[in-house]
Image: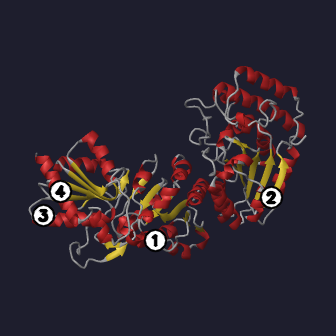
Amino acid sequence: MVNNKLNLSDQLFKKDIEKKFMRDGFGEGLLTAGEKDERIVVLTADLKESTRVNLFADSFPERFIEVGVSEQAMVTIASGLANYGKIPFCSSYAVFSPGRNWEQIRTTIGIDNYPVKIIGAQSGLNIGHYGVTHQGLEDIALARVIPNMNAIVPSDYIEAKKATLEIAKSDKPYYMRLPRIDSPVYTTDKTPFKIGKANILTESKIPEVAIIATGLLVYKALLAYKELEKNGIETIVVNMHTIKPLDEETVIRSAKLTGAVVTVEEHQIIGGLGSAISESLSKNFPVPMEILGVKDRFGQSGTPKELFEEYNLTKEDIIKAVKKVISRKNS
Amino acid sequence: MKYTIEDLEKIAIEVREDIVKMILKAGAGHPAGSLGMVEVFVALYYAILNHDPKNPNWEDRDRLILSNGHICPARYAVMSHVGYFEHKELLKFGGFGRILQGHPDKRFLPSLETTSGPLGCGLAQGCGIAIGAKMDKKRFRTFVITSDGEHDEGNHWEAVAFAGKNNLSNLTLIVDRNNIQIDGFTENVMPLEPLASKYQAFGWSTIEIDGHNFSEIVNAANKARAIYENPTVIIAKTIPGKGVPFMEGNPNWHAKAPSSDEAKQAIIDIRTMQGKIKTYGE
């Protein structure tokens, strides 16, 4: 049963549910944040339009800084801006930032705990055509391993907008990843969003499995839930939009309620959401787990559909993992 | 308070002794670069920077970023002399839980502008502060010290381009041109010359000075304040290990602590100079 308290879209399981881009949500949220707080400045490494910071740049040219294709300079300049008292947002692609400039983020933002916000767009396999070099599949791991750094992965356009507004208010460093493609807008303006507080999207009195997903694949987890429900398998679906700080309370409660967990992410299994959850459950409440993610492989060109099939990240793969974890639990 | 050149030279001798003692006591550190930049740090804290040791967070203070954090013994020693913390802390350099960490750590010593050590970041951080200050029409100046060896880093040149593009005239970079780095002489490891021309090509003003000559250092900093068109780099030619003859110009002393006997000899050498520190090229 869908959790009514969350005010999810009434089009939730409709075929023609509206689709929008999370990066648009980010760009619009950033503009609003910039209107509210003059300390916000925005830097980009030659990716103004595709990361949607052009909205901010057009309205606040005096607070917009183009650094050219230099991701290392972007974050170190942002460190200086934050040191002085600004709240900088740095936009690029996830492979380059926090990829190419990881040590600079660690040293000049992480250690001194500056409120720099790193936005990694074009994350995940979904970017399709552009291929392996541009598919950021390691960014969550890179971000969450840095002390002080927080990591957010929104799951639709509206959530991306809310997340942007929230991290803009924080005096802490954040990484936020964004996919390239559009996706179903399954939440509404009334859906609560609190950093570090996961949303339990579906409820059940006797759930057999907790499906904990993040980002673009949350909606696929909901589709899997729907089909499993038809087949008499009850699950709860958790939207883990904050990877760090991890909502351990919800993770543990979900594991206690179900006794089995499936995690779903468009990221390397090593170091991502599944890792974070197993780090928590292994010490708090170990249960059988299946981790769906990229299995220590690089990506390649293709349509998002082809790639999700090749890398076993479809609705059917989620259903298979749920059934497998149930059999492990019962054996 | 105004200081004469003679005053500053006396302070420089005390600072050099502090540096040798700190590195001896710690058993680790970077003596060559630290000794080579003594005059620059003394000049900055006594004659150039607008700063207040009693109010290190003063909003309108000049900022001093030390990019090549490994020469922190020189900065720490001078900071103690001007009153940022007690002089006796110097002998706890690099100790567990102490304010003077082995590389500069703002968490332990908040009066530092940045945590530093990994090379190539400092100029970009200075650019961030300087462009933020320009947005707010602030009058303070941002100074950045870098080594010459760290010019091998791409991050540094990205920042050089950025400062040139944005005409960051409120930014002064001081390059410690001592010609050594860990693996040997800079021109063998990765040639940097013609260094001044490279900066000019990126739209910077350049001033080349003897980094051991107080009047040249102070004059260059004053000249940079008066340049409104673009950022200025002061290339300070220094002798690594300056003041200790057996260390001078020797890359082996980049990151090596002296033995007790060597430290004794070093301090004797520093003292016998009696304030008459040889200048570059003599």
Q: Which residue is mark 3?
A: A229
Element marked by disc 3 = helix
Residue B119 location (% of width, % of height): 63, 48
Label for residue A322? 4
Closer-to-camera residue (A236/A168): A236
Element marked by disc 1 = helix
Q: Are marks 4 and 1 on the same chain?
A: yes
Distance from disc 2 to disc 4, alpha carbons, whole Å, reads: 66 Å
Q: Amino acid at mark 2?
A: Thr
Mark 1 crowd level (few <14, some 14–19, many ≥20, 10 Å Cα): many
Element marked by disc 4 = helix
Residue A9 location (% of width, % of height): 26, 72
Distance from disc 1 to disc 3, alpha carbons, whole Å, reads: 36 Å
Seen in the picture, residue A57 relative to A236 is either above or below; the reply is below
Q: In the picture, which quadrant includes the C terminus of chain A? A: top left
Query: Residue at horizontal 28%, vertical 39%?
Result: A283
Marks 4 and 1 in Cβ contact (< 8 Å) = no
Distance from disc 2 to disc 3, alpha carbons, whole Å, reads: 72 Å
Q: Amino acid at mark 4?
A: Val
Distance from disc 1 to disc 2, alpha carbons, whole Å, reads: 40 Å
Q: Which of the two discs, 1 and 3, labels the residue nearer the N terminus? A: 1
B126 relative position to A25: left or right? right
Q: Which residue is mark 2?
A: B206
Chain ID for label 4?
A
Q: Amino acid at mark 1?
A: Gly
> Going by the picture, which residue comes out furthest to the bottom?
A16
Q: Which residue is mark 1?
A: A27
Q: Closer to the camera: disc 1 or disc 2?
A: 2
Mark 3 crowd level (few <14, some 14–19, many ≥20, 10 Å Cα): few
